[in-house]
Amino acid sequence: MPEVNLIGDVKLFGAAILQTRNPGQRHAAIIFKDRAKSHLSLLHLAWHYDLRCEPLNTPYRPVSNHYFDDEELELFAEHASRLYDENKSGIPYGMEYTGASVFNGDMKFVSSPGAGLTCATFILGFFNSLGFEILDLSTWQARPDDAQWQEGIYTALEQNFSPEQAESQRNLIGSAYRYRPEEVVGCFGVFESDAIGFSEAVGIGTRLLDEMRS
């Protein structure tokens, strides 16, 4: 059976990916339908303490999942709306993600010294809070350019960090695993029930990038 495209229409809930101005960088987001709005909304961690909920716009490419039923998708959409309501003051940016719960039962970010998320781990944390492990973190591997990306993020954010945050994030350079937006969004699109391992996720991420270019 031929593979179904990852990029496709989203009606209730899905994910989205954006090619940024930097050719090597993508941005990940959640798409959801708020009952109070007529349009689809885009929920994403744009930057340090910059959580945004805005109308879905054209440059983002939507990715749907056909394995969740409508009841589940409606539940996800309600939780996305609640997450934004509980975290309008923002969520810190951070390079480490261990799979531990980052949102409490009310979808409020669980802050701790040095805690933070990227646009991609924001999505992983969202699903983790609902009992779904999209990626098998135990299989993850470091890649040669991870440290270069982490160094760039640290340099861009250093002046916005508290001394405690700065020390915590600096110590992660070269040691924290990177979860790339195209891999997280792509794996959401094919997720059924079992967490997806590193090698498969890399292939799915490449497949999504190929679709974005075609």
Image (spheres, helix red, strand yellow):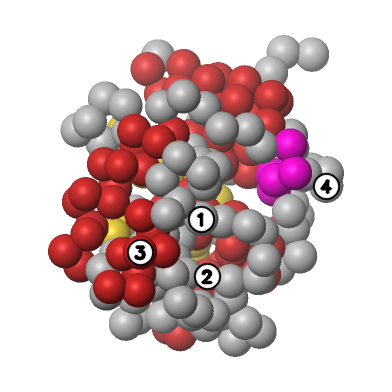
- Pointer 2 or 1: first along the chain: 2
Where does label 2 land, which residue?
Answer: 80
Is 77 located above or below residue 40 in the figure? below
Q: Residues within 10 Å of mark 4 (few under 14, many from 20)?
A: few
Where in the figure is residue 47, as x and y percent of width and height?
29, 59
x 31%, y 64%: residue: 166
Where in the figure is residue 79, as x and y percent of width and height?
58, 74
Distance between mark 3 and mark 1 Cα atoms = 13 Å
Relative side of 201 to 28, left or right: right
- Pointer 4 or 1: first along the chain: 1
* Marks 4 & 2, CB-CB < 8 Å contact: no
Where does label 4 land, which residue?
Answer: 193
Classify residue 101 by image quadrant: bottom right
Residue 136's tag is none
Q: Residue furthest left?
A: 159
Distance between mark 4 and mark 2 Cα atoms = 20 Å
Q: Is label 2 in a helix, a strand or a loop?
A: helix
Query: Could you tell me which quadrant the N terminus lies in?
Result: top right
Is 121 located above or below residue 196 in the figure? below
Where does label 1 land, which residue?
Answer: 96
Relative side of 129 to 16, left or right: right
- Pointer 3 or 1: first along the chain: 1
In the image, residue 127 lies in the stretch drawn in magenta: no
Where does label 3 land, which residue?
Answer: 167
Distance between mark 4 and mark 3 Cα atoms = 37 Å
**Residue range (magenta):** 134-139
Where in the figure is residue 133, as x and y percent of width and height?
73, 53
